[in-house]
Image (cartoon, rainbow, N blue to C red):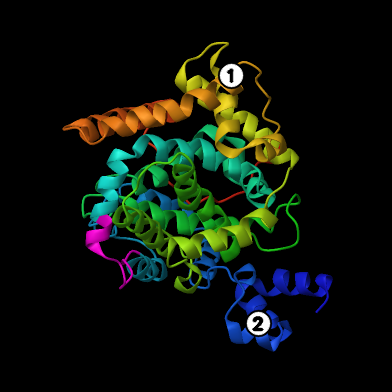
Amino acid sequence: MDEPSRRRVLKAGGALGALGALAVALPAQARAAGADPRWVWDEEADPLVAALLDRGDVPKVNELLWDWKRNDQPLPAGLPADLRDFMEQARRLPSWAERGKLETAAEFNKTRGLYLNLMNGVGGGMLSTAIPKEAQAVYYSKGGADMEDRVAKTSLLGFAVGSPVAYRPEGDCVVNAVKTRLVHAAVRHLLQQSPHWPDEIPISQNDMLVTWHTLPTFAMRRMRDWEIEIPDADAAAYLHLWQVTAHLLGIRDEFIPGTWSEADAQSDRVLPPAMGPTREGVELTDILLGQLAEQTSPGSVSRPLCNALARYLVGDKVADWDEIPREPVWDPAVSAAWPLLVKFREGLIPRPLVPEAAWLLDEAARQYILFYLTKGKETKIEIPTMNRPERAA
């Protein structure tokens, strides 16, 4: 099947129709080896959310789900029956989830919260803006018109994963992951109607894996680079935490790496080809670093420092794609100081009460960031009903 024909199939038939057509077109060897994640989306959520949008049910659904906050909280009454059935299934942890590993991961997040928040927030953010398909999906979807709100809602999921109660009954990781899965399905449906979007379906399983590797895989690699000693049990638990999260986000189990070796190999395979510069990515980078500078200490020094920190985390190649300015003073200062800070902090962690104190400081920083981004207003992940307004594009 040539590219124009394939695009027509995608446009006309949607994800399910495309899968059938592509199954015919793919070589027998590829079909035997399993589905290609580049041509798989979310067979359960996509038609459901498209129907909700077409029926005009999304505003009511967002209103009903506003107060759905805890993992153990029943779904609100009044949801459309098809959505309720989907969510009851989607909120269940996979059969292979291990409670002990999730608890170990929660303790690991306590002691390494500073590194993880920095890499998942700043590092992951800069990597995502250097992924053309992701940067353009963010830019041209509704969230691209208000990046503070978009980052705040993204942070809700990231902070939920890093919470000590992430997958406990009182936590909210399940809630935010399922809501994010619904958002992805809505964006897939809506972006195809945007005049700025290529004639293809966004946020494939491969796209989600690419993003996934900018978070736990990137974080683990950087901690190894910094020679942080991480017990094997902690490393396995941290991976397990993100495996469960990937499942709840709608990534097929067959695509989720089972070990860190598999994660490293998959990251090397899918991430580099997906990366590169775009105008949208450069603009989003400037907005994100501007927000970071304002969150920390408004003034003339903070933005150059944020530029240097971002460049240090992601490296010169990605930083140049994102057009992050080089800082002659701060770049060498950050490169020299950060390893010393890590070494000092790692020396303190084994001492009594230090993990708890570190968590309190990290949590205070998280709450401050959310307060800044939301202007003190309560924020929840909501299903969009439109793309980025043309006047704001």
Quarter of the figure with residue 391: top right
Amino acid type, callout 1? Trp
In the rendered image, the vertical position of residue 358 relative to residue 256, given as above or below: above
Residue at 60 percent across and 25 percent down: it is 307
Circle on res. 330: 1
Residue at 60 percent across and 87 percent down: it is 32
In the image, residue 159 lies in the stretch drawn in magenta:
no
Q: Which residue is mark 2?
A: 30
Return the residue found at the far left: 352
Q: State which tag comes first along the sequence, 2 or 1.
A: 2
In the rendered image, the vertical position of residue 205 relative to residue 393, given as above or below: below
The residues colored magenta run: 91-102
Measured as percent of width and height from the top left, residue 142 is found at 59, 44
Q: Is residue 271 left or right of residue 235?
A: right
Quarter of the figure with residue 204: bottom right
Relative depth, front residue between 152 and 352: 352
* Element on which disc 1 rests: helix
Quadrant the C terminus occupies: top right
